[in-house]
Image (cartoon, rainbow, N blue to C red):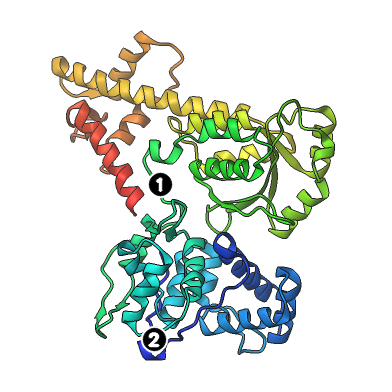
Amino acid sequence: MGFELPVPLPWNERTNSVYPIPGGKTGTLISLRRICEHVLDTSVSKEDLIEWVCDELSVGTNHSQASVDFLNRAGLVASDKRPVAVPEAVRSWLRTREDYIPIAVMHGRIRFIGEMLSEIPGCQSSADLLRRSRVYGHTWDGAAQISSRLAWLVSANLVDDSSGHLELTSQGEILLEQLDIHNPDGTVTRAASRPLPHRNRRQTDSEELGDVPQELLVACTDTANPTRFEQAVCRAFAALGFVAEHLGGSGRTDVLLTAPLGKEDAFLVAVDAKTRKSGPLPDANVDWLALKEHRNKHRAEYSLLVAPDPSGDRLKRRAREFGVTLLSARQLADICARHATARLSLVEYTKLFASPGDAELAELDEAAQQVADLRSLAATICRELLEGTKNHGRMTAREVELILREQATGLPDGTVESLLDTLSHPLIGAVYRFSPRGQDKARYVLAASLDSCEQRIRALINHTDQG
């Protein structure tokens, strides 16, 4: 991944206290990102940064100063330098959005960060963690220090407390095995060799998609609970492969999407989600200037408005005027449902946002149909190879193509040979390609049973998910 976890300081050189910067469990890392981006964008002194935090994060001077001092102790912002600097590890986080990075940096400077991760499997609550902290030598009177640490860990999606008790997420489990952990007896458990976590790791289709399509359709009309719809929209885009952050709240975009496509092609989308009981969404219900401000604030390339029925003519005109794309909850639900069987890339999903006004879905529909057709054709090729080679031995791409043309018309030239070469790639290995000397055409045979071929493809997917 190009990032090496920092070596922790000795236990007696690490600080005891964690200070809660603004944002809480849902926004701690969002606040950190805003602070770091401000430092990188401007040459500021510590005093200037304290004043900026007061104004931008709406906290008092004492809280702001304590926050900046803590970030310096934690190794997240070098406020003891003039001008204030952002360490390289944190710059890596800003580029990659891998949220384990600031936690790993903190672990190297602060006691009971990774250690608390290691204790969570045996603890159900903050009170349990407080009791366990005492065996590490901590004598905190209350659970404030535990809560402050949990805010960071939950914000980084390393710990889940949504069910009422504490659980490590899959990302938290993987990071834990990458950290050197100080034990209560003074020994250190060294990190195991496992891949570092990727944010929003892919789950199985059923785990990833879940009830997202149905929840979108129900939540979009739940006007008494608009946050529910915001969260449903966030989950929907996460299922499509975006890095999705639910922000919400006054002055914030509801959901911020990141397409992690590398330095040149990555893009951000500021998403606003509007509920309505019935009927088209009125133009008067949308603060267009706020949507434009959200896009500029996050330096997002696109703005998206998701609502039950964003179909009014005046709404569409205003959307085009302010550069906002309109998408109905039904359209997003259909896209998610289709994604389970025809997974498109984030590059292709760019088409969703490229045209202000009504979302242009025709190209997406065409791309999804192409994926479905190619998948069906690949399966047919495997079946024909299985039957054809029983009687004729190894087959050329042309021979397979002629059989398929007897069954269907409109097969583009070269498609069969391209798919055969893809299926014969060593990473897939569903088909074996023979290129004997003296023969100008390659010949193919199914490499295993149809079930075994399917298992090989699934094994590749599963291995990719784990890495």
Residue behind mark 1 = 202
Looking at the image, which residue is at 60% across and 84% down? 69
Q: Residue at x 51, y 74 (%)?
A: 144
Q: Position of residue 239 (x, y in %)?
A: 49, 42
Q: Quadrant of the C terminus?
A: bottom left
* SS at circle 2: loop
For label 2, the residue is 9
- Residue at the outermost top position: 406
Q: Residues within 10 Å of mark 2 (few under 14, many from 20)?
A: some
Quadrant of the image occupied by residue 229: top right
Circle 1 — which element?
loop
Quadrant for the N terminus, please: bottom left
Q: Is residue 177 left or right of residue 227?
A: left
Percent coordinates x, y for residue 302 in the rendering: 69, 47
Identified at 56% across, 41% down, the residue is 232
Residue lying farthest to the front in this orientation = 141
Mark 2 belongs to which amino acid?
A: Leu
- Image side of residue 141 versus residue 195, left or right: right
Mark 2 to mark 1: distance in Å?
33 Å
Residue 428 in view of the camera: no
User: For the point 34% across and 64% down, which residue is it?
Assistant: 123
Q: Three-letter amino acid code at disc 1?
A: Arg
